[in-house]
Amino acid sequence: MADQVKCLYCGKKIPADSAHCPECGAVSHFQERGYRAGVRRKFIFWFVLLVIFCAIMIVWFPR
């Protein structure tokens, strides 16, 4: 059986690799594989897009 941890919200024992607590539905903060796959890549994409947009606005607007 997988390691179990206590849910931070309801206190019930849940599997350590569970994404959500099956009892209360809260997000588990004990995941070994990360919060969600692809979140970091998505964040970097939007951050780079924002930086490019800001650079264009700085150049485009008159001083």
Image (cartoon, helix red, strand yellow):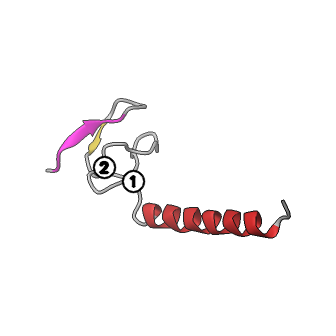
Label 1 packing within 10 angstroms: few (<14), some (14-19), many (20+): some
Secondary structure of residue under mark 2: loop
In terms of image quadrants, where is residue 54? bottom right
- Residue pictured at 27% horizontal, 52% vertical: 17
Residue 4: image location, x then y, percent: 22, 41
**Residue under label 2:** 31
The residue lying toward the viewer, choosing from 46 and 63, is 63
Which mark is on residue 26?
A: none
In terms of image quadrants, where is residue 50? bottom right
Is residue 6 shown in magenta? yes
* Left or right, 29 with reference to 55: left
Is residue 2 placed above or below 60 in the rendered structure? Answer: above
Residue at the far front: name it.
63
Do the residues under discs 1 and 2 have CB atoms within 8 angstroms?
A: yes
**Residue under label 1:** 35
Is residue 10 placed above or below 62 in the rendered structure? Answer: above
Residue 3: image location, x then y, percent: 17, 45
* C-alpha distance separating marks 1 and 2: 7 Å
